[in-house]
Amino acid sequence: MNPMLQKSLPDPQAVLSVDSQELDSQENSKEDITNKQFGFLDSFAKKEIRRTLFKAVAIPGYQVPYSSREMPIARGFGTGGLQITLSLLGQDDVLKVIDQGSDESVNAVNIRNFISKTCPGVSLTKHTPEATIIQTRHRIPEFPLKLGQILVFQVPYPDPLVIVENSEAKRKQMHGEGDYARLWVKLYEDMVKFSEITISHRYPTRINGHYVIDPSPIPRFDVPKLHQVPGLHLFGAGREKKIYAVPPFTDAQPLTFDDVPFRVEDFNDADGNRRSCNRCGSTDSYLDEFLDEEGCRVYQCSDSDYCNSMLSK
């Protein structure tokens, strides 16, 4: 090789050394960013979600659009509620996560593990009165919410009008005008066909005398718990990119006819007696029905924390 050309070429060992140093510095910077990124979401995402929450609380029941982020779980598995929770959590908060009342279901355990890894310092609990933020799927805890507590709902479908109107633009106009005539017709058709309203969950509920919301797939048993309670209820639909809220001490009235009062699940047996929890004996909680090992029907509290608390008394 020409000696002059050989002098102009860089030393391969030196190039490899510089490249390895640059890679190490990049990896260290990524680790620093990850360590500083409390709550998985970046600061811009958290700020936008918090601004959306302010508007949702200021206009009870109004569906506020937001830019739903990609999460490490699939849309439809609680991404909306998870984004709200991560945006609100601070290191001094106490978090509880439940799925259909249970602390030990797959959804609840996985979300709790994810938050524990991305939010260092946040305390976790399974006892409702101890929590400052409660993320839930399909249930409202049996223990009444206290002032200062926040209940975050995972919502699959935020708009109650979707069952009667396909066009989102038309639904927005109907919400703005308070035009829920087609929902009333749907309820009336139930009365004509079945002599009662057959909606078992996602029961349409009017908030603060105007907007009607889908309270997520909670059973009818839980709908009265939204009315005039001290806690804050936040609803996040990640797939549909909507957030709405029921602020503390706000009216929440299920749609009912004057001559057909709203009725919740009573869990009465054939003799008209209220069934009790097979485990703790409670007669005032929402019960799940299942079959035991002998094939007999058994009823047990849906809220595992409430059941454990009653059992320990």
Image (cartoon, rainbow, N blue to C red):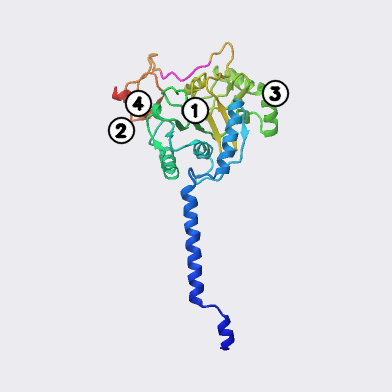
Query: How far apart are the two marked residues, 1 and 3, measured between alpha carbons?
Result: 26 Å
x then y, percent, for residue 61: 60, 26
Contact? badges 2 and 3 (CB < 8 Å): no
Q: Classify residue 7 as left or right of residue 32.
A: right
Dot 4, how many residues are within 10 Å of its Cα: few (below 14), some (14-19), or many (20+)? some
Whole-angstrom CA distance, mark 4 to mark 1, is 19 Å
Q: Main secondary structure of the magenta part?
A: loop
Q: Amino acid at mark 1?
A: Ile
Residue 177 numbered tag: 3
Residue 295 % position (x, y): 33, 30
Based on the picture, tell me whether residue 245 belongs to the magenta stretch: no
Residue 236 in sight: yes
CB of mark 3 within 8 Å of CB of mark 4? no
**Which amino acid, mark 2?**
Glu
Camera-side mark, 2 or 1:
1
Q: Tell me what residue is drawn at x 68 percent, y 26 percent.
A: 176
Dot 2 corresponds to which residue?
A: 293
Most foreground residue, 299 or 139 = 139
Q: Which residue is mark 4?
A: 307
Foreground: disc 2 or disc 3: 3
Can you identify the residue that label 1 sits on? 218
Crowd rating for badge 3 (residues with CA inside 10 Å; few <14, some 14–19, many 20+): few
Q: How many marks?
A: 4
Whichever of callouts 4 and 1 sits on the residue coming sooner in the sequence is 1
- Magenta stretch contains residue 265: yes
- Quarter of the picture containing the C terminus is top left
In front: 308, or 170?
Answer: 308
Asked which secondary structure carries label 2, the reply is loop
